Image (tube, rainbow, N blue to C red):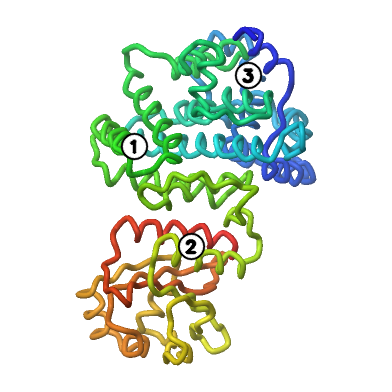
Amino acid sequence: MELADWFSSVAARRWPVLPGTQAELAQLRARNVDLIHFSDLANLCLSDPLLLFDLLRVLGQSAAMQRNESTPTVEQMLMLVGLEGSIRRLGPLPALRPSRGVVDAETFEAVGDWLARGRVAALVVKEWLSIANEPKVEDAFVAALVYNLPACFYLLQRNAVPDPPLLQAVSAAYGVDYPKLLEAFARAMPLPPGLSAMFGAGGGHDARRRQVLRLAVATANGLEHGWWRPQFVAGIDAAARLVGSDFDTLYSVVVQAALSVGRHPRAPAYAYPARYLAMLEGDTRRTKMREVASLARVDDLDAALREAIRALANELKFERVMYWRFDAGQNALRLKYQIGVAAEHPLKRLAIDLAAGSFFALLSSRPQSFHAPLAARARLAEKYPDAFFSTVDATEFAVMTVFAGDTLAGVFYVDNVNSGRPIADDHYLRFKTLIAQTSRHA
């Protein structure tokens, strides 16, 4: 199929949205229109590139919009269509779901994964440009959401996941580099012309913004292959030079973006970017939704907690892992799940009192984590009278709270009690990432 014919086949139909999006659309349609705000619908469009695409096509077909080189915000687009018109158009869109022979489970998973990467890239480019004091970020945000869409339509139409990297496979299929294909896609649909400009090359005022966009997309799309790869690190370093910041600041933006997408999933695979950050160095095994009872698919908190305990011990190799459940009646923490605690160890009988002024009372006051190397652990034991410090071995540890909304659910604790091995920064980061994923089920 020629490129123009493929674009025509994409434009000839309206596409379903992700399951979580369709559920929220149904809730919006059930409400009185006077209770719906443009901002509610705009945020929903920005959370699902498939829904956003449907809206962009409406505006892209406007002759006035095609003469305007600037891209309006999504909320402004909705205002142009009107609230009732937007609800009528977007509300009936069906949900994309696995269906054997139509959209197989592997295809559904891959589409959700690549759309999630676009969402991560959008959050990243928004923050990176804000760090650079760029006044315009919305068009870059929208461009990042759209970036992987042609590849996702390629997956859906073929109902097969290619062996080469997806964007490379799409480029090879049509004999054109993906950025050029993306420009042509935006013109063919058509989408607002400002988006085509963001995908293009060249200099001018927007050159830096386009460069930062490409680096943000490459960073999000490259998470699957490992955060430790030199190419991944070099991309963030390059972005840091462009925006006048440093690697650590920009990397933390990537982590927070991946966690944010995982906490608000439109499809199960929205949790994948955060899981890629939790991989051990050198581990590039692809986790399949249909093979693993992943955290993204676990609805029961206890099952999610057990899965987290297993992952902390088996994948991150912590020698002792404990989950302390909050007992509201006693205002205390009690050990519920553990690996590495001896049968007769007093920790199994300990109730950690959350009396005011204690370490665990302070820790449990809000969602947070804490890493205590040996020196810090010694200072804590001296400063706080918690019975925990006299009961547990004097070793480096890390802790993190789990909250259900504003309510404490429990606390995770990890250490390497047998070997005394320090907790490396990357292991602490992946510990936090994993527990943050688990907290979504609280």
Which residue is disc 3 drawn over?
Answer: 59
User: Can you tell which mark lies on residue 311?
Assistant: 2
Which residue is disc 1 drawn over?
Answer: 232
The mark nearer the N terminus, 3 or 1, is: 3
Q: Is residue 411 above or below residue 118?
A: below
Label 1's element?
helix
| Point 77% across, 38% down: residue | 99
Q: Quadrant of residue 398?
A: bottom left
Q: Position of residue 244 (x, y in %)?
A: 23, 34
Residues packed near mark 1 inside 10 Å, few (<14), some (14 to 19) or many (20 plus): some
> Quick one: quadrant of the C terminus?
bottom right
Q: Amino acid at mark 2?
A: Ala
User: Can you tell which mark lies on residue 412?
Assistant: none
| Point 58% across, 87% down: residue | 329
Label 3's element?
helix
Q: Label 3 vs label 1: CA separation?
A: 35 Å
Tally of marks: 3
Q: Amino acid at mark 3?
A: Leu
| Point 73% across, 40% down: residue | 98
Front tag of 3 and 1: 1
| Point 65% across, 9% down: residue | 1
